[in-house]
Image (spheres, grey):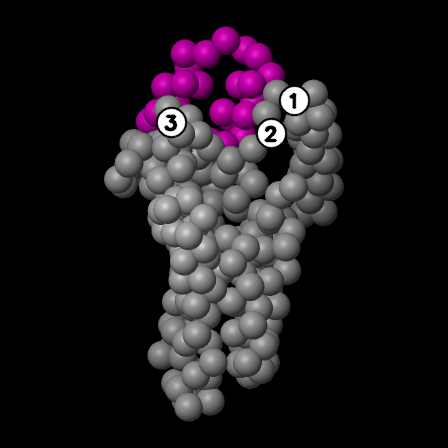
Amino acid sequence: VYTESLFLMLICGSFYFFRTKHYFWAFIFGFLACLTRVFGVLIFISFLIDIFVYKIPVKKSFWVFFIPLGLISYMIYLNYSVGDPLAFYNLQLIVGEQHERGVVLFPQVVYRYLKILFNSDLTPLLTTVILELVAGVLFFVLPIIGFFKKIRLSYLFFAFFGYLLPTIQGSFSSLPRYVLVLFPSFIILALMIKPLPKPIKILLGILSLSLLLIETSFFVRGYWVA
C-alpha cells in the first residue's frame, strides 16, 4: 500500500483551505499530512512564506503554526516503538547501498546515474534507472522554470524541496513515485505544454500512455516495487 494518493489529498486539502482562509482546516489536513509523510512539514514552511509575502495576520492564521505537531507526534511514536525518533531517516540506509548518511549533492547523484546507465546491460531494470534519472532532472528543472513563470513562491518552495529531500542521501530511488505529490510542478508542466500545437500534445499523450503501460507491466511482473 502506497501513501502517495492519501498524501496528495491531504496536502491539496491543506493548501486549498489555507488559500480560502479556513486556517483551522488547513491545520487539520496539514497535521494529518505530517503523519502520513514526514515531508508534510514542508507545508508549514510554505504557509509561513505566504504569511510573510502576502502579509497575512498571524492572529488569523495562528492555527497553521501547529502543523509541525504532526511530525513531532510521529517522532514520539517512533521513539517509543523502535527507540529512534529519526528512524524514517536512519532506516533508509538499509534499503540499498545507493543511500548514504549525510548530504549528497545533486550533480553527484546525476553522475552516478549516468555511470550506471552507460555501464549496464539492456534489461527491463535499466528502464527503472532511466525513469528515475529523467524524473530526477525534470523535477529539478521545473521549479526553476516556474520561478520565471511567476508561480507562487510557496508553491515553488514545496515543489523544489519536496523533490530535493528524497535525493540528499545520494539516490533518485523511488523518485518517480515521490514526485507524484508535487502538484506545483505539474501545474508548471501544464503551463509549458498548453501553448504547444495540438499534434504535439496528442503525441505527448500517446507517448505518456505507452510508457505507463510498459512500466505497469514491469511493475506487475515484479521487476520493481518501490
- Residue 136: x and y in percent read 45, 38
Numbered marks: total: 3
Residue marked by disc 1: 222
Q: Amino acid at mark 2?
A: Val
Height in image: 105 above or below 114?
Answer: below
Label 1 CA crowd tier, 10 Å (few <14, some 14–19, many 20+):
few
Label 2 CA crowd tier, 10 Å (few <14, some 14–19, many 20+):
few
Overall secondary structure of the magenta stretch? helix
Height in image: 93 above or below 47?
Answer: above
Q: Is residue 119 magenta?
A: yes
Q: Nearer the viewer, residue 66 or 26?
A: 66
Q: Which residue is depicted at the point 27% across and 41% down? A: 103
Residue marked by disc 3: 98
Alpha carbon distance from label 3 to label 2: 16 Å
Q: Is residue 132 left or right of residue 110?
A: right
Q: Amino acid at mark 1?
A: Gly
As helix, strand or loop, the secondary structure at mark 3 comes to loop
Label whose residue precedes the other's in the sequence (1 or 3): 3
Q: Which residues are magenta?
A: 110-133
Locate the C terminus and report the quarter of the image it occupies.
Answer: top right
Residue marked by disc 2: 225
- Residue 222: x and y in percent read 65, 22
- Residue 177: x and y in percent read 56, 41
